[in-house]
Image (tube, helix red, strand yellow):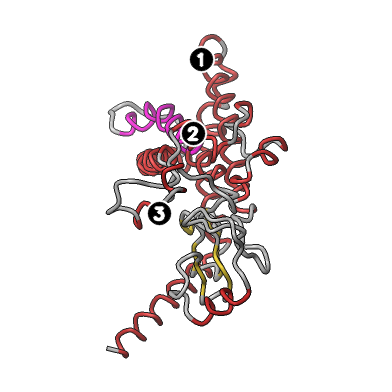
Amino acid sequence: MHRSGTTMAWNVFKFCTALRGLGSIMILLVLGVVGVTYYAVVLTNYGPALSQGGLDSLAALTILILFHFLLAMLLWSYFSVVFTDPGVVPPNWRPSTDEERGESDPLNSLEFVGLQADSSSNPRVRFCRKCNQLKPSRCHHCSVCGRCVLKMDHHCVWVVNCVGALNYKYFLLFLFYTFLETTLVTMVLMPHFIAFFSDEEIPGTPGTLATTFLAFVLNLAFALSVMGFLIMHISLVAGNTTTIEAYEKKTSTKWRYDLGKKKNFEQVFGMDKRYWLIPGYTEEDLRRMPELQGLEYPSKPDFDSQ
């Protein structure tokens, strides 16, 4: 039995090491898909159509403007997720309140030492044995990153980073703009894709035709898969929960952090509507909403009284 557990731990370690090793390969893969798509849409099909004149040129111009706008927002959101730290526990952090029972007395040194010895001896706070530190509420340890992440949702290999409190909004915007962009590309390349199966002669070299075919298939696949992820995360935001928390509380009918759809949404996107579709926050939102920093989260009054 011990051998089996050791083998499983070793397999998980190798899996996490492999995910770390992917590194910039995944970023290059994303940029490769973007490059193929750009070549097919702009350089092969709709860029040359600008010189045709008439309605064809107007339609091509409209498509290219929308394509470049969505692409810019997609890449902005993507690299915001990649390069934004998801949130780590501050050094020597200790809770100032009992977040599970709503008490305001700070954790004293005796409790802290006792908690290190036996994390089950004090139900007031959580302790990470791997990081050897206390964990705030909604914080989880990531085996891939090797650290605790605030309000961790999951580790995403596509962004080579954890998705947590400080970059979750950027991840959602990345999904949103990816879905819009891939859907647009699928629609504008569909006539060219259908032409492959007709008896008419298709203009272009074998290379450009193959690129168009590949771009359509890739964008259709991404549009369908991202749509599923987007729907799932919309439901998570509506309930003010994460992927990890949804699994942990699947047997519970109530959730202490569910404050209603409007407040739940604002805890991710902020209160300033001008910034809802931009990967960033206003200084005012960061100042008046400590939950955006990942350490403090208001809960339902009925839970605070328990």
Residue beneath the point at 50% across and 47% down:
33
Q: Quadrant of residue 39?
A: top right
Residue lying farthest to the right in this orientation: 283
Which mark identifies residue 245?
3
Q: Secondary structure at mark 1?
A: helix
Expressed as whole percent of the image width and height from the top left, the position of residue 147 reads: 56, 68
Which of the two labelled residues, at mark 3 and mark 2, occupies the earlier sequence position? 2
Q: Horizontal placement of 195 versus 265: left or right?
A: left
Residue type of the residue flagged with mark 1: Asp
Q: Residues within 10 Å of mark 2 (few under 14, many from 20)?
A: many
Quadrant of the image for the N terminus?
bottom left
Expressed as whole percent of the image width and height from the top left, the position of residue 8 reads: 34, 80
Residue receiving disc 1: 56
Task: Mark 3 and mark 2 in contact? Answer it, CB < 8 Å.
Answer: no
Residue beneath the point at 50% across and 67% down:
126
Answer whether residue 79 is magenta in the image: no
Reply above or below: 257 against 6.
above
Disc 3 versus disc 2: distance between alpha carbons?
30 Å
Residue type of the residue flagged with mark 3: Glu
Q: Quadrant of residue 300?
A: top left
Q: Residues within 10 Å of mark 1 (few under 14, many from 20)?
A: some
Answer whether residue 189 is magenta in the image: yes
Expressed as whole percent of the image width and height from the top left, the position of residue 27 reads: 56, 55
Q: Which residues are magenta?
A: 176-196
In front: 29, or 75? 75
Which of the two labelled residues, at mark 1 and mark 2, occupies the earlier sequence position? 1
In front: 208, or 56? 56
Q: Horizontal placement of 47 versus 92: left or right?
A: left
Disc 1 versus disc 2: distance between alpha carbons?
21 Å
